[in-house]
Amino acid sequence: MPTEPLRLAAAVVELEGPEHITEIAGRIENAGHSVHVRALWGEVPHTFFGKPDGDPAPDEYRNHHLDVLNAVHAFTEAAHAHLNDDATPRRR
């Protein structure tokens, strides 16, 4: 999974979007990067996405694809609410 399109999309959202949506776009970028790294090396370096202090828990069983899907869903909900001036995101 190439991550350049995610990085570029997140940069556009950072320039144009409100802060709460920018944060969600960053989660999509990070999760996509985790999928990419996992596909290349079989693990995600904790120095990039682990806890900054102390040893992070093992990441072996984390479903990074699901992280991407959840982040995209959260982004879609937040963007929909923002663009349509809804007070709360829509629920299906």
Image (cartoon, grey):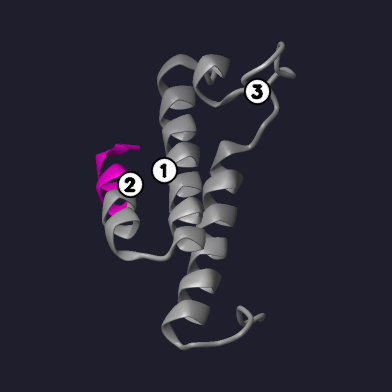
Image point (55%, 26%), residue name: 49
Which residue is rendered at x = 26% and y = 56% of the image?
12
Mark 1 secondary-structure assignment:
helix
Where is residue 40? Give x, y as percent: 40, 20
Quarter of the image where one finds residue 16: bottom left
At label 3, which amino acid type do we have?
Answer: Lys
Of callouts 1 and 2, which one flags the residue occurring earlier in the amino acid sequence? Answer: 2
* Label 1 with label 2: CB-CB less than 8 Å: yes
At mark 2, the secondary structure is helix
Q: Do the residues labelled 3 and 2 touch (CB within 8 Å)?
A: no
Which range of residues does the magenta coloring cover? Answer: 1-9
What amino acid type is highlighted by mark number 2? Answer: Leu
Identify residue for label 2. Answer: 6
The relative height of residue 66 versus residue 73 in the rendered view (above or below) is: above
Along the line of sight, the residue nearer the viewer: 46 or 59: 46
Q: Which of 36 and 78 is in front in this view?
A: 78
Q: How far apart are marks 1 and 2 (CA)?
A: 5 Å
Q: Where is residue 86 in the image (x, y as percent from the top left)?
A: 55, 87
Q: In which quarter of the image is the C terminus?
A: bottom right
Residue density around tag 1, few if under 14, some if 14–19, many if 20 or more, within 10 Å: many
Q: Residue furthest right?
A: 57
User: Which residue is identified by label 3?
Assistant: 51
